[in-house]
Image (tube, rainbow, N blue to C red):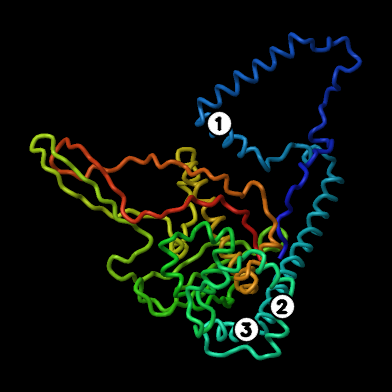
Amino acid sequence: MAEPIRNKRPDVTAPTPQNTPSVAAPISSHAQQPGIASIKEEEMDRAAAASIFAQNPQLVQMIQGKLGTLIGRPSGYIESLPPVVRRRVSGLRAIQKDHAKLESELQEEILQLEKKYFAKFTPLYEKRSSIVNGTVEPTDDEVKAGEDEDFDQLQAQTMGDEDAKKSDFPENVAGIPEFWLSAMKNHMSLAEIITDRDGAALKHLVDVRMEYLEEPGFRLIFEFSTNEFFTNKTITKTYFYQNESGYGGDFIYDHAEGDKIEWYPGKDLTVRVEAKKQRNKNTKQTRIVKKTVPTESFFNFFSPPKPPTDDDDDDENFDIGSEIEDRLELDYQLGEDIKEKLIPHAIDWFTGEALRFEEQDDGELDDGFDEDDDEDEDDLSDDGDEEDESDEDDESGKPKQEAAECKTS
């Protein structure tokens, strides 16, 4: 699967009949070159314009929306060509359509090839699961083949002698405890959506696997042992592609569906209870009012955002539609990371070796600052004007991750 090109140099527009001015620039004319005074005036004008835009974000959005409607509109150049030239253009477009058909066939064959090798990978995944969960032990030959002196030295350097002796697990523990939780925490994108509260439930994660659908798409399967949080033995999330291929023959992500999690009472990790102390100004009596509000959690991954509707694309709902699009891109990218990175290379994520091969983008690194939550609390009191003091219980939300670039497989 091709990764997005990083640090790509900006495209420089080459001169074409569409963007070349019809009137030559006054190089040979008697036009006066700008002086220092005129340059300062231009800088002042730009500063004033920037100030206006900064104070009017709605104006910026309106302009961006209008400019967006101009993209893809014909310049009139093609229509101005002689009929014989336009006929040749139509011929080239026909050739391009044939090329598009071959691209779609290529993507379909790639998908079938992926399914063929996935069938070969499956026995390896099953054996990995057996070792992780302690039902079988690796053979001596497998242990010897997996030994790596460089890796052992690296682990020894990062761990002191005292730390090496300490362990939270008994010597005769079965399998590899917290294998999947540790692997997911080493993946940057997944680690950002796993809270401390989630860890207690994800310790019971015994396997992560996937399967292809008969139609274009795939399903992620998370298997859990018996735990105190929910009754589900497996929680799945399915990604669907559109029926028609996109430009270049790629499959286009359509939507995702997740299983409903059957939480035990009071164990839902996707919500938190806020306790608000209210005091009546007249009677001076106080009371505690509790309400349940959504909170950050890895398990929100199984409640994917719904694609924006046509109503979200108008000017009034521009921000809503844009936010949904960003969440969809992030949601799809997380699914792709689990499918393409975590599942095939789980042991490398568990040991941390996979981090050496990950490209670190400066724009995605955490700058150490969290955004303040300025949302107003709802007044739950029926007693009129009251003084409120609110306390949040069991809050462990983490900052939201920036949307990753959406790619298709």
As helix, strand or loop, the secondary structure at mark 1 comes to: helix
Q: Quadrant of the C terminus?
A: bottom right
320 in relation to 139, above or below: above
Label annotation for residue 1: none
Label annotation for residue 60: 1
14 vs 82, nearest the viewer: 14
Q: Earlier in the sequence, mark 1 or mark 2?
A: 1
Mark 3 and mark 2: span between their CA atoms? 14 Å
| Residue 103 at x, y percent in the picture | 75, 65
Mark 3 and mark 1: span between their CA atoms? 52 Å
Q: Is residue 238 left or right of residue 270?
A: right
Which residue has dot 2 on it? 113
What amino acid does circle 2 point to? Leu
Q: Is residue 127 left or right of residue 109?
A: left
- Mark closer to the observer (3, 1): 3
What amino acid does circle 1 point to? Val
**Residue 251's image quarter?**
bottom right
